[in-house]
Amino acid sequence: MIRFWILLAGVMLQATALAQNPAQQYVQQMVRRRALQGTLVGVSVQDAQGQTVVAYHDRERLTPASNTKLVTTGCALHAFGPDYRFKTGLGYTGTIQDGTLEGDLYIMGGGDPTIGAKDSLALKPDALFWKWKTILKDAGIQRIHGRIVGDGSAYEGHLEHASWSYDDLGTYYGTGTSALCFYQNAIDYSVAAGAGVNAPVKFVQTYPETPWMHTANYGVTGPEGSGNTLYLYTTDLAPYAELRGGYALDRKPKTEHFANKFGALTCAYYFWKNLKATGWEVTGGYADVDRGGRLRGPDFQPVEPAGKPVEIGHSESPRLRDIARIANWESDNFYAESFLRAMGEAATGVASYDSCLVAIRDVLLDLGAPADDIRLADGSGLSRMNYMSARTLTDFLQAMKGSPAFPAFLESLPAPGQGTLNVIRLQDGQRIRMKSGSMDGVLCYSGYVLDSSGSPAYTFSVLTNNATARTQEVRAVLVGFLEFLLSL
């Protein structure tokens, strides 16, 4: 009983100290602002020693949106190391005789998310294909009497998480990941308004080519001021997609980015095209591997493979630390999901989402982070079934400071004015490194405040859910909070 009263007294003293804390008082006033009225808010700030500076509903689990990427990228860097590189193997079935491969050539995906990517980090396809052709030549292959097979079968399970919104599945940010991808499994279309209201939208595929796809255009031109509501509805179950929605008559033409659910087949197609264009003899076309392990060409008629391919070499991705930087700076869902799938594959041999979440929990435990206080559904934050509290996020950020990968993790986080934080301007903003997270009704910021030497002085997390005010209004309140943190 005496111990109980001592503990209670300690809690009451801490609560009294927080109530008298200027930072706590600031937050208590902040949440009363009109933009946050009726909004769920969680705030946690800890100092360099992990002592609580601010706690406002800091244990309430909320949807963190892309703040989820902090956990995904941090755990991946810790688990694999900042210099880790994904490998893509080349292999064959059949025999090699007098420079001729009598059989199929396989591109065996190992989770490299950068193949054919449009960012500056990735090799351009022709440069990567040159490396692959060098591997073929070193193995004595000069001609291929067989198919080019894109094999993404190393990752089991669905491309996407089941909780993702149906509308998100056809977007570039909801593409889903595969062990072998191309152009981040995205596809670009040029779209423009038609000649008049209710006329079909002008809709032209630009890159990459997917000649096996059948895409129906049901997009219509809307009246002026009606905006852009175009979505591409697609699936990996069949080579069929539909464009639906409207595009206002007064909108300028633009490039829209949608999802390509056949990344492995696209990769095989482009390598096949490159080989043919550079004088290689390839007689068997291109194919991928379906979920049953069968080969499937552009006619989508499955056939049994000739056997298990023999690997003859591999290419490597850029360093994980560099991919993680783009994932956090640009809030790249595809890269983040690729990290999660890779952790599941490495830890359990199965890259389905259930296995991935077991794997990331093990990494959290190794870090000493609060694994039981995090509910993850995916790696990017696109799911609304991700739940974390502000305190959980500051605890995780504290734990990351003890990881050998921490310098790379800190480097992966943008400052205000950079990447997705380009809408935020702070006078001393370079002292903040953080990740934003946003979706309809959700806006979150979590990260570090650095001291004059560049070391973390504070970890912080502010999560807002179910906001009805405009995002700009909520952001203005949270930017004021960031400015206050810089004054501590």
Image (cartoon, rainbow, N blue to C red):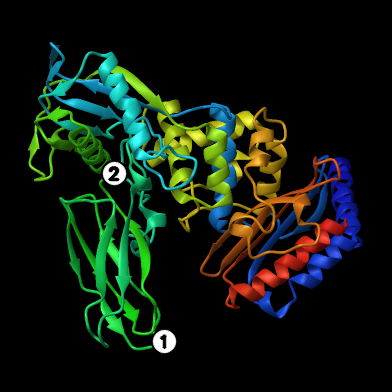
Residue at 58% across, 43% down: 325
Choose top left, top right, bottom left or bottom right for residue 4. Answer: top right
Q: Where in the figure is residue 380, as x and y percent of width and height?
A: 49, 49
Name the residue beneath numbered marker 2.
263
**Front one among 189 and 369:** 189
Determine the image quadrant of residue 50: top right
482 or 389: nearer the viewer: 482
Q: Earlier in the sequence, mark 2 or mark 1?
A: 1
Q: Residue at x 67, y 77 (%)?
A: 35
The residue positioned 23% from the left and 51% from the top of the image is 209
282 vs 194: above or below: above
* Residue 311 position (above or below residue 467): above
Q: Residue furthest front?
A: 279
Which residue is outermost to the top? 98
SS for callout 2: helix
**Residue 151 x %, y %:** 25, 32
Work out which quarter of the rendered image holds the C terminus and state it. Answer: bottom right
Report whether residue 163 is seen.
no
**Which three-letter amino acid code belongs to the residue tagged 2?**
Gly
- The answer to whether residue 458 is above or below residue 28 is above
Q: Is residue 371 above or below residue 104?
A: below
For label 1, the SS is loop
Give the residue type at disc 1: Gly
Disc 2 residue crowd, few under 14, some 14–19, many 20+, Cα 10 Å: many
Q: Which residue is mark 1?
A: 225
